[in-house]
Image (cartoon, helix red, strand yellow):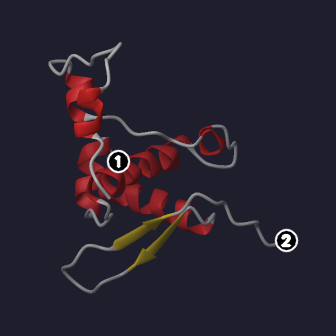
């Protein structure tokens, strides 16, 4: 698949992004509205999910350490672990443990599993 950049240079632009803006320079992450508005997901879990998405969109992979997640979000590692467990229980992420001393591998999903009665 070719990059869209060369094609865009041939099109007359009607908008530009000021790259000195720190928000534009560092990117942004889209969060699906059904997750944002889902009352059964805590605010902390939504934040962790968004940060996982930011890693995944940027690198096409998602395996940050829990210390890194905690540092980026401003929470403790213990709290991040609880929130990851919440996301896993409702089916928004799948965690593959890769062994001692290695980070987990996270699969970020866009479908909430139905809860068993």
Cα separation, mark 1 vs mark 2, equals: 33 Å
Hey, which residue is sitting farthest bottom in the picture? 99
Q: Is residue 23 left or right of residue 78?
A: left
Q: Position of residue 69 (x, y in %)?
A: 29, 53
**Residue drawn at (25%, 64%) of the image:** 65
Classify 68 as above or below 36: below
Q: Which residue is mark 2?
A: 117
**Residue drawn at (26%, 19%) of the image:** 17
Q: Position of residue 43 (x, y in %)?
A: 53, 41
Q: Position of residue 112 (x, y in %)?
A: 66, 60
- Front of the two marks 1 and 2: 1
Q: Quadrant of residue 14?
A: top left
**Residue drawn at (32%, 25%) of the image:** 11
Q: Quadrant of the C terminus?
A: bottom right
Q: Nearer the viewer, residue 98 or 16?
A: 16
Element at badge 2? loop
Hey, which residue is sitting farthest right in the picture? 117
Q: Position of residue 54 (x, y in %)?
A: 35, 47
Could you tell me if the residues under marks 1 and 2 are in contact, i.e. CB atoms within 8 Å?
no
Q: Which residue is mark 1?
A: 54
**Residue drawn at (36%, 81%) of the image:** 97
């Amino acid at each position: 698949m070719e990059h869209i950049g060369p094609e865009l240079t041939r099109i007359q632009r009607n908008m530009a992004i000021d790259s000195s803006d720190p928000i534009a320079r560092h990117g942004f992450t889209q969060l699906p509205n059904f997750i944002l508005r889902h009352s059964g997901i805590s605010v902390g879990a939504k934040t962790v999910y968004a940060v996982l998405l930011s890693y995944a969109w940027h690198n096409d992979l998602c395996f940050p350490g829990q210390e890194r997640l905690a540092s980026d979000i401003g929470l403790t590692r213990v709290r991040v672990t609880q929130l990851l467990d919440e996301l896993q229980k409702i089916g928004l992420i799948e965690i593959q443990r890769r062994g001692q001393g290695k980070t987990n591998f996270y699969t970020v999903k866009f479908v909430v599993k139905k809860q068993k009665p």
